[in-house]
C-alpha cells in the first residue's frame, strides 16, 4: 500500500504545488485564461486558496517522509478532498459544468486519505 500511496500522493502534490503556486503569485489577468472563476472572487481569496493548496501538497509529503506525525497526511488528503467539493460547487454555481478535473482530484484525494490511513 505504501507504493500506491506515494504514487497517488506524489501526483496530487505535483498538481497542487503547481496550481497553488500559480494562484499565489500570478495576477488575475495571468490566471484568467486557465481559471475563469477568478473574476468572481477577491484576489485575497484566490491567494488564500493557493496557500491552502501549497500547504496541502506539503502535508501529503512531509509527514510521511520525515515520520513526524504521519497521521497528518490523512488530514491533508481529507482537506484537499473538501477543497475539491467546494471547487465543484463554485463551478456549478457559475454555470460551468466542466468539473471532470475536480472530480478526478476529489477521487484521488479520497484514495490518498484511505491509503495513508491503512499504510
Image: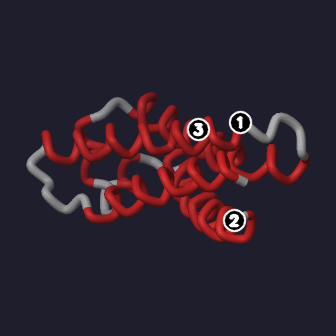
Q: Which residue is mark 1?
A: 72
Q: Residue at position x 40%, y 53% from top?
A: 106
Q: Which residue is mark 3?
A: 51
User: Sequence-wise, which precedes: disc 2 or disc 1?
Assistant: 2
Quarter of the rendering occupied by the N terminus: bottom right
Distance, label 3 to label 1, CA atoms, is 17 Å
Eyeballing the image, is 107 above or below 73?
Answer: below
Give yes or no for contact between labels 3 and 1 (Cβ–Cβ under 8 Å): no
Q: Quadrant of residue 97?
A: bottom left
Distance, label 2 to label 1, CA atoms, is 17 Å
- In the shown orientation, is residue 53 left or right of residue 59? left
Q: Secondary structure at mark 3?
A: helix
Eyeballing the image, is 5 above or below 88?
Answer: below
Q: Secondary structure at mark 1?
A: helix
x, y percentage for residue 30?
A: 41, 57
Q: Nearer the viewer, mark 3 or mark 1?
A: 1
Q: Residue at position x 63%, y 41% from top?
A: 74
Q: How many marks?
A: 3
- In the shown orientation, is residue 91 left or right of residue 43? left
The 10 Å Cα crowd at callout 3, few under 14, some 14 to 19, many 20 or more, is some
Q: Which residue is mark 2?
A: 1
Q: Residue furthest front?
A: 118
Q: Quadrant of residue 76?
A: top right
Amino acid at each position: 500500500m505504501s507504493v500506491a500511496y506515494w504514487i497517488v500522493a506524489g501526483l496530487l502534490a505535483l498538481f497542487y504545488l503547481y496550481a497553488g503556486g500559480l494562484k499565489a503569485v500570478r495576477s488575475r489577468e495571468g490566471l484568467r485564461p486557465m481559471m475563469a472563476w477568478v473574476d468572481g472572487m477577491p484576489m485575497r481569496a484566490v491567494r488564500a486558496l493557493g496557500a491552502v493548496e501549497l500547504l496541502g501538497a506539503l502535508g501529503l509529503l512531509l509527514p510521511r517522509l520525515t515520520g513526524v506525525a504521519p497521521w497528518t497526511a490523512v488530514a491533508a488528503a481529507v482537506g484537499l478532498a473538501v477543497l475539491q467539493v467546494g471547487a465543484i460547487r463554485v463551478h456549478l454555481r457559475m454555470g460551468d459544468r466542466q468539473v471532470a478535473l475536480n472530480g478526478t482530484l476529489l477521487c484521488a484525494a479520497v484514495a490518498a486519505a484511505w491509503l495513508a490511513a491503512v499504510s
